[in-house]
Amino acid sequence: MSFLVLDPTPEKAPPQGQLAPRLASLEGKTVGFISNGKEGTKGFFSHLERLLREEHGVGQVVSRTKSNYSAPADAAIVAETKGWDAVISGIGD
Amino acid sequence: MPLSSRTYEAHDIGAVQELYHSNGWTDGLPIVPPTGEAVEACLDWAMMPPDQLIGIEPVRGLPVTAEKLAINAVMAGCLPMHFPVVVTAWTAMMQEEFLMHGATASTGGCAVLVVLNGPIRLELGASGGFNALGNSDRATAVIGRAIRLCLINLLDVRPGSIDRSTLGHPGKFSYCVAEDEEDTSWLSLSQQRGLPREASAVTVMAAGAPRQIMNEWTTRPEEILETFAAEMRANLRHYSIHPGNYALVIPKQLRDHLQAAGWSKSDIAAFIHERARIHRREWAEVGKGAVVRDRGDSVYPAMESSDQLLVVAAGGPAGGFGAVIPPWLGNKSHAVTLAIGACVDCEPPK
């Protein structure tokens, strides 16, 4: 006995996010960090900030932490990213 | 309106199983072949066209249609009469306060607990008696399984993909319980949460595995409930200090003692709210001293208020057992209760 059966998935690929264009240089740029607020992010981001400032000449680092580490970034943080040259989002467990 | 999903031909039942398993479309168990006829029967029962939009997953903006829910419900073993429950549970899960993406993606590994209330339990033969949190009956087994298959196939909540659970728990196969409304004088869970008794309803909660307790050596409500509270304190110490929805499942033997003493669900919730709390310094006793810091004297209740406790009458008639079902992660996700057949975003009539 043969069966005609149906595809249980959406079949269409979900909309994908798009990466911002790569910066030619980090010199003097403003880089934003978005942390999920977990303990493991603290050491990681502080080390990364030092690397960016000392080895890549980043002008300013702005650190923001989500109010709920299991939800998307707060609207205010997303709005703020428009003023940054680059964004690094990280989770820590 | 015809179904729009892609069809596949499989030559026999074994080929159906291999088709679905090899595409990653199952939970590892055999599925019921979702034929057009079976899927249309579900949609007809619920009076839904295939393209009816049940909701949009709020984080990634993915539409969820009745046709795709019905395909997965058939795969799980649902009959048409089970399908409205699956639709309502999914509608509830897509409410913003449930935080479905976080709850289903988290390393914390919770499952979606579904509690059934109202007349539909009897229509479906959903039992809140023996083995209530296990394989108690066909209806709760297949409804709970449908919730998980829909997550896997509609939102890619597969282990290692969206689902990043470290451990998970067996409730991720199926986690559905019907309240035993006939054998209790208490208000049902959905009544406690504001719905009329005659409404059939679904409550969803992002939930950890049940933690079973036992106290057969007293009839005093305070002593019985102290055992439940102690298990909640253990969860606060060993798992998470965040307050949120907890569920207590209270079978008949302990329930009878509480009811005989005149304790309502609200009385139980008020007592539990007072007793289920710990000092932060207790974390040092269980190996978590590093995060006590200077806040050792701070008190952490299991719930922000007594109405966060979901008390469910269910379980077999004998045995002084009960269960505490802890939240995934405190208030990150809130339990949602919806009536079956109710519209959650309809405009009122003008």
Image: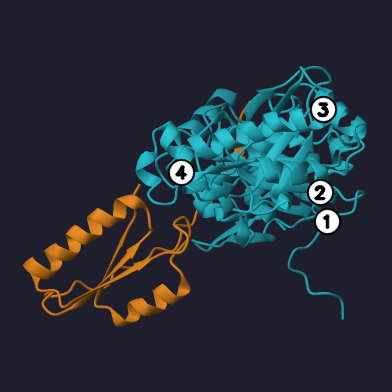
Chain colours: A orange, B cyan
Judging from the image, what secondary structure is the residue with disc 3 in? loop
Question: In 3D space, how far apart are the residues under numbered discs 4 and 2 (Cα atoms)?
Answer: 29 Å
Which chain's residue wears label 2?
B
- Callout 4 environment at 10 Å: few (<14), some (14 to 19), or many (20+)? many
Q: What residue type is labelled 4?
A: Asp
Confirm whether circles 1 and 3 share one chain: yes
Instruction: Find out whether the residues at labels 4 and 3 contact each other: C-beta distance under 8 Å.
Output: no
Q: What residue type is labelled 1?
A: Gly
Which image quadrant for residue B288? top left
Q: Name the residue under label 3.
A: B220
- Name the residue type under label 2: Ser
Q: In which quarter of the image is the N terminus of chain B?
A: bottom right
Of mark 1 and mark 3, the one earlier in the sequence is 1
Label 3 and label 2 in one chain: yes
Q: Mark 1–mark 4 contact, CB under 8 Å? A: no
- Tag 4's secondary structure? loop
Q: Residue B190 carries which label?
A: 2
Is residue B24 rendered to the left or right of residue A80?
A: right
Q: Mark 4 lies on which chain?
A: B
Work out whether mark 3 precedes mark 2 in sequence or the reverse, and give the earlier one.
2
Q: Determine which residue is flagged by label 1.
A: B194
**Earlier sequence position, callout 1 versus callout 4:** 4
Mark 1 or 4, closer to the camera = 1
Marks 1/3: CA–CA distance = 29 Å
Q: x and y percent of residue B156 in the render? A: 48, 47
Q: Can residue B76 be seen in this view?
A: no
Q: How crowded is mark 3: few (under 14 residues within 10 Å), some or many (20 or more)?
A: some
Q: Which label belongs to residue B163?
A: 4
Q: Residue B24, how many percent across, how many down?
A: 46, 37
Disc 1 to disc 4, how far (Cα)?
A: 33 Å
Work out how far the residue at label 3 is from the one at label 2, CA to CA, in angstroms. Answer: 27 Å
